[in-house]
Image: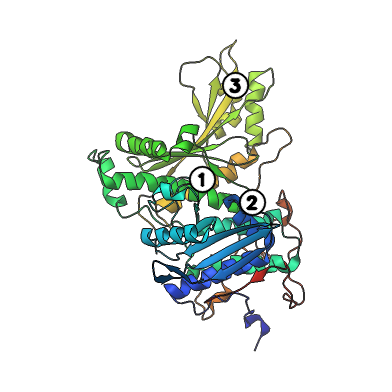
Amino acid sequence: MSAKSWHEARLIPTSGIGKGREQERRATSALLAVMGVVRDFGQSICRPLGAPAGPLETYIEVPFTLNGKELRPDGLIRVTRGSRTWTALVEVKTDKNELSLEQVDNYISIALQEGYDAVLTISNQVPPLPGTHPTPVDRRRLRRVQLAHLSWSEVLTTAVIQKEHRGVSDPEQAWILGELIRYLEYDGSGALEFTDMGSHWTSVRSGVCNNTVRIGDPGAREVAQRWDALVRFVSLQLGRRLGSEVTQVLSRAETRDPAIRSDTVLKELVEDGRLSGEIRIPDAHSTIAMVADLRSSLLTCSTVVDASDSARQRTRVMRLTKQLAGIEFDLDVAALVKNSRTPPPVVRLAALVENPDALVPDAGREIRGFRLSRGVALSTNKSGTGGFVNSVQKGVENFYDEVLSRLKIAKTTPPRTRSLPEADKSPSKLSSTDLSSQDEPDESSQYDPNEHTAPSPPTAPPTSPLSGRDPSGSRISQLG
């Protein structure tokens, strides 16, 4: 038997995963165990919740008694530094299971009863805005306990950024973190991606096209909230590939009061038939604005960039076209002229390369910047590889790869996306060998490892990946 057909043993096996409770227990145990061993990763999850920088102890299914009834949260995290101890209860959902308000309320009550600091929930639900929670918990109960939520997409993104971009100093810990990433990227793990726009998507989309949808329609508000959740998901996915924190652009008022953002999106959806959002990428020249027009089924991605400080207006145009050389799709370019109230002319990039004077303003007028935009056909299907979510995600990622990543700010180079190998779609009895982001591309891949802007330390596993010791010195236990 050829060794090429052998299957490598995995620390966290993906074969034989059940559904429901068994799937949740395996995901919880795998995540918390790796958080306890790989301190850099564990702290990157717990630090934003207020935990000190100390060793992590992690437990699963810890029993508590509340009002005479035994309850078992999925997990518990304890961080100790000096005389301070920080403790959080953890509730986990996988697949399409959603958090229960009753469960979350009970765990808040336990945290208050025991004097714990936080309750952390993890599921595939993506809240519309950062800092919000998928369940409508009474905020008055959170004066002494913090309630935080992470989507599995956020957990996976944090793990990939920590391992591939920030780096893990201990090669054994890096290998262990890579095993968690493999597990979460496996379809059967229950850590799903954002897949659809909700149960009301089809009726709301039809109502928008027929001008029959109204502000008060509950389905319309759900679609508006799902859109912001999609914008956050796109940000996470792009950040995972770039190794940086890609964030949604919000006003101060929207950050303070999420209802303002929700009302704004809902009004634009009902009145204009459009959904819009904006994301910011660190070290990139500008933000990416996206507009999904449901009536024309068109997604428009755009960015505004500053013009060079050259004295000649024609030179400013030529410097822009030089940076954008090689783009294979149609890109619209508009010159933004100082103190001009008339709409700027729009020229295709290919035509602008041939004739830079097409955007040169009249004598005495100065170009202050350029608006670059691209429109692509937008699928209106609810879900699937060719659905609305997928077309928005791919449209934004392609716009960044082909446009924004080419534009440099002084000596700063925009982050480059990391290409992943194509998974083998042929059937396999041992699907635990499916390719993940932890597999190096084969010789035919176009991935260039030297193009990382912040390469991580060597993460190749040692001859004996587990030497019988706890690399971090932390404690991993199971109670109950």
Disc 3 target residue: 368
**Circle 1 SS class:** helix
Of the pair 354 and 156, the residue shown nearer to us: 156
At label 2, which amino acid type do we have? Answer: Gly
Badge 2 crowding class, 10 Å Cα cut-off, few under 14, some 14 to 19, many 20 or more, is: many
Q: At 34% across and 39% down in the image, what residue appears?
A: 266
The residue labelled by disc 1 is 396
- Viewer-proximal residue among 43 and 95: 43
Labels 1, 2: front one: 2
From mark 3 to mark 2, how far is it between C-alphas? Answer: 31 Å
Q: Dot 3 lies on which element?
A: strand
CA gap between label 1 and label 2 equals 16 Å
Residue 188, horizontal then vertical, whole percent: 48, 71
Residue placed farthest to the top in the image? 364
Is residue 104 visible in the rendered image? The answer is yes
Q: Position of residue 50 (x, y in %)?
A: 60, 51
Q: Answer whether labels 1 and 3 touch (C-beta < 8 Å).
A: no
Mark 1: few, some, or many residues within 10 Å (few <14, many ≥20)?
Answer: many
Name the residue type under label 3: Arg
**Which disc is residue 475 wearing?**
none
Residue type beneath disc 1: Val
Find out whether the residues at labels 3 and 2 contact each other: C-beta distance under 8 Å.
no
Q: Confirm or deny contact between disc 1 and disc 2 (CB under 8 A).
A: no
Give the residue at x 71% y 51%: 451
Q: Earlier in the sequence, mark 3 or mark 2?
A: 2
- Mark 1 or mark 3, which has the lower sequence index? 3
Q: How far apart are marks 1 and 3 (CA)?
A: 25 Å
Write down the residue under mark 2. Answer: 243
Q: Farthest residue toward the bottom?
A: 1
Vertical placement of residue 33 versus 148, above or below: below
- Regarding mark 2 in the picture, which secondary structure is present there? loop
